Amino acid sequence: MAVIEDELSLVFTALADPTRRAILERLARGDATVNQLAEPFAMTQQAVSKHLKVLERARLISRTRTAQSRPCVLETVRLDEASDWIARHRQIWADRHDRLAEHLAALRTEQRPDEGTS
């Protein structure tokens, strides 16, 4: 479980940055080179490359080799794992919220008869 948690930490850290999320959104439309990924940003190619290294480390992207170019490719497996983790924890918290609501409703029901006797 610790290994999975560490991988999730890398994924969530990578996703925490809006530039990296924008890069992933672009790659969802298809493979792209570093130059193509850098186009919409007011930053150097080196800065974009640093973002790509973070995404690669989190295994959210990979780079292939096509002749002289090394296009980046979106890897969805880690995103699926992160989504599954969020869904599991969302369900846990929803269940806890439901139990709390039931408990509060029971407390209100118990207090109502006492309110009329004063």
Image (cartoon, grey):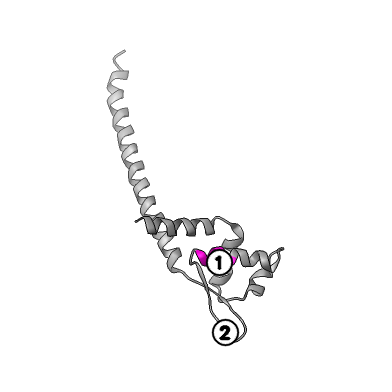
Amino acid type, label 1? Leu
Q: Is residue 60 above or below residue 106?
A: below
| Mark in the foreground, 1 or 2 | 2
77 vs 117: above or below: below
**Which residue sits at x=51%, y=65%?**
57
**Which is nearer the N-term, disc 1 or disc 2?**
1
Name, please, the residue furthest toward the top: 118
The quarter holding residue 27 reads bottom right
Residues tagged 1 and 2 counted as in contact (Cβ below 8 A) = no
Q: Position of residue 80 (x, y in %)?
A: 42, 64
Q: Quadrant of residue 48?
A: bottom right
Question: Which residue type does callout 2 highlight?
Answer: Thr
- Helix, strand, or loop for circle 2? loop
The magenta segment: 52-57
Give 2 or 33, whichever is nearer the viewer. Answer: 2
Residue 14: horizontal and vertical position, in percent?
A: 53, 59
Q: Which mark is residue 66?
A: 2
User: Label 1's element?
Assistant: helix
Q: Position of residue 82 (x, y in %)?
A: 43, 59
Q: Residue furthest bottom?
A: 67
